[in-house]
Amino acid sequence: MYKRIFNMLLAALLVGVVAACDEDSSILDPENNPQSIELELMVDEDLTEALVMDAEAAIDATLGPAPMVSGMEFSEPPVMFSTPPDPEIIAEARAKLRDECRPLFQQAREAWRSGDTEAAAEFAFQGRLCVAEALIMVFGEEAYDNLWERLEHVLTWLEEGVDEDTSDLIARIRELMDEADEIKNGPEIENQLALATERLLLALQIGNRERFRQRRQEMQQHARFSIFMAQSAINLALQVAGDDITERQVRAARHAQHMIVHAVQAQENGRYGLAFHLAREAVNVGLLVVVLEPGVTEANLVEVMVQLSAMAIQAAQQALSGAAQQEFAEHLLRHAEMLKGKADLVAATRPRVAVHLYWHAAVTAYGVILLSSDSA
């Protein structure tokens, strides 16, 4: 199964590489070579480091809350885990990420720079499989389930045209998710769950293609805004969870918090692309906290999100009423109202899409509240 997965991946990538050999083409030209861009994303330093740090944040979430960074402190109700994590497994998983996964991605980049496309794809695949194995050591099938939920969020954002036409990218992500499902639920094989999870990690990684292409020149600004939105998302999620927050919600919240800390540190070090990708995914992890709220089911999730977004927007409107003019906050509020309006239109026919749009509406509105409280 491992060889089949890798050979399928390599065959798809080589189509782009052959096309890139045309004298009028460039292997780095995303317009002409989408497969080449996929391989470039697989070895990109910021995106591969984001995958590793994302996994580290998830694992660190089992140990405790995120540390204070740059004056930003997280709070949460005290929680005692009924089944505390095994410290030896945690240490082994973190060591695997540090000593095995990162070097594999480094080898992938070196192979890419030397023009060895096949070796680059192989090392990148091994790096993702390594990350998948580390996550499964700690979380088991929960790692797969959480990634699947986050990819639903990515697909919604792409389908709603937040970026430019992405029909080919959407199709590729769905193809990878189908492959993951086929592996996970197919005949029993060695390393089955890790191989399935690797497919989801690749889908998550290439989901950044449009932003990767369009926002390189503006990444510093986008990183700063994404960190702000991630803070808004986790604050809102913790408000929803309240004092009776569950163990799994705590892990998801801490995961997002650790990702935000990593994002802030990356921004301070000038790694704006890394900061952007980490913060963007922290928003998606924040939604998990809400989805995992006791009493929230597939049947009532849309209604829960309708109420959450409506309350957040109403609170944001009240926060701005009578206050001094705040152009940016007012822009955010209009954006939140637009997102909720789009969600209302599709709630009956495309409930999963609506859930993610309502979430972004609520997070954006909560950001308005945070801005208003800071300026008060």
Image: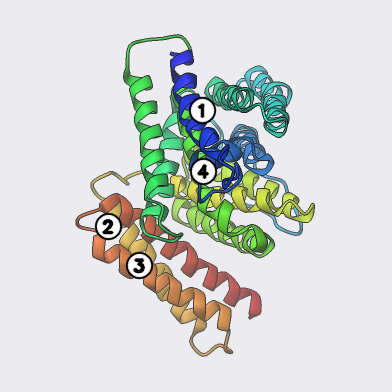
Left or right of 350? Residue 282 is right
Distance in Å between CA atoms under marks 2 and 4: 42 Å
Compared with residue 315, is residue 161 higher up or lower down, i.e. above or below?
above
Q: Please report whichever mark, 1 or 4, sits nearer to the chain's N-terminal start.
A: 4
Any mark on residue 340, and which? 3
Rate crowding at label 2 as few (under 14), some (14 to 19) or many (20 or more) other CA atoms within 10 Å. Answer: some
Query: Which residue is tagged 1?
Result: 82
Image quarter (top left, top right, bottom left or bottom right) of the N terminus: top left
Q: Between marks 2 and 1, how big is the CA–CA gap? A: 31 Å
Tell me the quarter of the image containing the C terminus. Answer: bottom right
Q: Between tags 3 and 2, which lies in front? A: 3
Please tell me which of labels 3 and 4 falls first in the chain. 4
Nearer to me, 173 or 92: 173
> Residue 330: percent from the left, percent from the top?
51, 80
Q: Position of residue 82 (x, y in %)?
A: 51, 27
x 32%, y 20%: residue = 185
Query: Which residue occupies the extreme right position in the image?
Result: 269
